[in-house]
């Protein structure tokens, strides 16, 4: 996808397993107080100083020396070596003690991390996430279903031929090819390698994209949280081909859908950050929408409009009383996901999104005409009456 000049869209393949009941298995699954990861079969406890090796194209190279008291997750047991993930191995000898969890814990860990994937049926979605609480339109001419439990475990899923064609999530239990939200860039690279694209000349890197044979996979990186993954978006190339320009076509209904999705993303983010969700304010949204229209129509980008009116002036003119107020604006991002994640990586905008000083928000989106479709202008106005 294109972000201002180039924004990258993503997509990925994951694994699916039967659902388990939360009443049967805890989340996360703990083994002696430490989370049991998906694919983990055991652990090694270091008894004497020994060496961990790195498997480099079939050759074991020295990685580092480990000391008694350290322990490591084990994901495979092959020949005389235990595999620790990321290409690391340790020899099975008297310097280590290998342990396995109970079968029940292994089953719970496997099922608890079950993830939907591109190509899964609508029945799989329903069985895992339940019925659709809300639907919006997307730039590919299909609909996007939004799932959450009071904004926890947030998913936005689009279907093509009754199968998953795109999936965005902030669910910390979700995994794709062994990569989970809150993983670091190093952990991502250990799983999927370093053959990826980024958003361009930005630093720190905000989006990492892996191009796969059938999909693209985007990992949004939170530069204000130790460069950890904050969200994952998967998109099928077949869906992307329904709008090869990636920018949306001019559509009032699609503008409204982007507004709804951004509102949902703001509250999903606030839930992740542990602050109360915001109420939707219709009059505030009208003020925000008028500013997006004004910027897009008159080809400028600023908090103050061409008449010199500030966001606070516009709220007052719109009949919105407030004690606290703030505004975020963005443009050029092809959809609400990229706009939201970019705003979260800008410290001032991030503070508005997660601030406890606000109780209400209104979102306004306008698509300005452009050669390759239209360019979205986004405005978010936050208030406390």
Image (cartoon, rainbow, N blue to C red):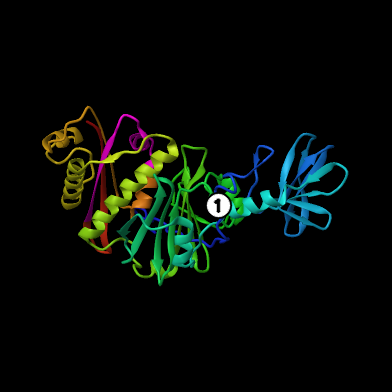
Q: Which residue is mark 1?
A: 21
Judging depth in this view, the residue of 107 and 194 nearest the camera is 107
Q: Residue 78's spot in the image, x, y percent?
A: 79, 58
Give whichever of 227, 232 is nearer the camera: 232
View extreme (front): residue: 23
At 59% from the left and 51% from the top, the residue drawn is: 189
Q: Nearer the viewer, residue 118 or 134?
A: 134
Query: Is residue 364 a member of the stretch shown in magenta?
Result: yes
Quarter of the image with the C terminus is: top left
Q: Is 201 in the magenta? A: no
Q: Nearer the viewer, residue 201 or 46?
A: 46
Marks counted in the figure total 1
Start-end of magenta stretch: 343-367
**Image quarter in which the N terminus is found:** bottom left
In this rendering, position of residue 259 left or right of residue 214? left
State which quadrant residue 52 falls in.
top right
Q: Secondary structure at mark 1?
A: loop
Q: Is residue 267 left or right of residue 11?
A: left
User: Horizontal and vertical percent for residue 128?
Assistant: 49, 57
């Amino acid at each position: 996808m294109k972000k201002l000049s180039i924004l990258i869209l993503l997509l990925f393949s994951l694994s699916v397993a039967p659902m388990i009941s939360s009443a049967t298995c805890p989340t996360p699954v703990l083994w002696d107080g430490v989370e049991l990861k998906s694919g983990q079969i055991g652990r090694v406890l270091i008894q004497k100083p020994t060496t961990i090796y790195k498997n480099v194209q079939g050759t074991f190279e020295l990685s580092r020396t480990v000391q008694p008291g350290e322990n490591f997750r084990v994901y495979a047991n092959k020949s005389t070596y235990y595999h620790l993930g990321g290409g690391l191995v340790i020899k099975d000898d008297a310097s280590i003690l290998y342990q396995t969890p109970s079968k029940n814990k292994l089953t719970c860990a496997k099922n608890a991390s079950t993830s939907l994937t591109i190509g899964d049926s609508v029945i799989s979605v329903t069985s895992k996430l339940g019925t659709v609480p809300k639907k919006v339109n997307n730039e590919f001419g299909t609909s996007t279903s939004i799932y959450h439990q009071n904004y926890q475990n947030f998913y936005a899923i689009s279907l093509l031929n009754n199968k998953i064609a795109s999936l965005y999530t902030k669910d910390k239990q979700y995994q794709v090819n062994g990569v989970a939200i809150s993983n670091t860039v190093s952990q991502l690279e250990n799983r999927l390698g370093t053959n990826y694209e980024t958003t361009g000349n930005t630093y720190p890197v905000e989006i990492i994209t892996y191009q796969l044979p059938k999909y693209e996979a985007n990992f949004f990186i939170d530069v204000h949280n130790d460069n950890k993954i904050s969200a994952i978006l998967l998109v099928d190339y077949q869906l992307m081909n329904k709008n090869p320009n990636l920018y949306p076509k001019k559509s009032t209904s699609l503008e409204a859908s982007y507004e709804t999705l951004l509102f949902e993303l703001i509250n999903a983010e606030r839930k992740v950050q542990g602050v109360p969700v915001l109420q939707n304010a219709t009059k505030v949204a009208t003020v925000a929408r008028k500013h997006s229209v004004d910027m897009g129509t008159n080809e400028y980008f600023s908090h103050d409009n061409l008449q010199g009116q500030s966001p606070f002036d516009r709220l007052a003119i719109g009949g919105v009383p407030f004690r606290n107020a703030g505004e975020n604006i963005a443009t050029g991002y092809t959809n609400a996901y990229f706009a939201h994640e970019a705003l979260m990586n800008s410290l001032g905008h991030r503070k508005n999104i997660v601030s406890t000083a606000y109780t209400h928000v209104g979102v306004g989106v306008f698509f300005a005409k452009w050669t390759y479709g239209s360019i979205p202008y986004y405005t978010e106005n936050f208030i406390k009456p």
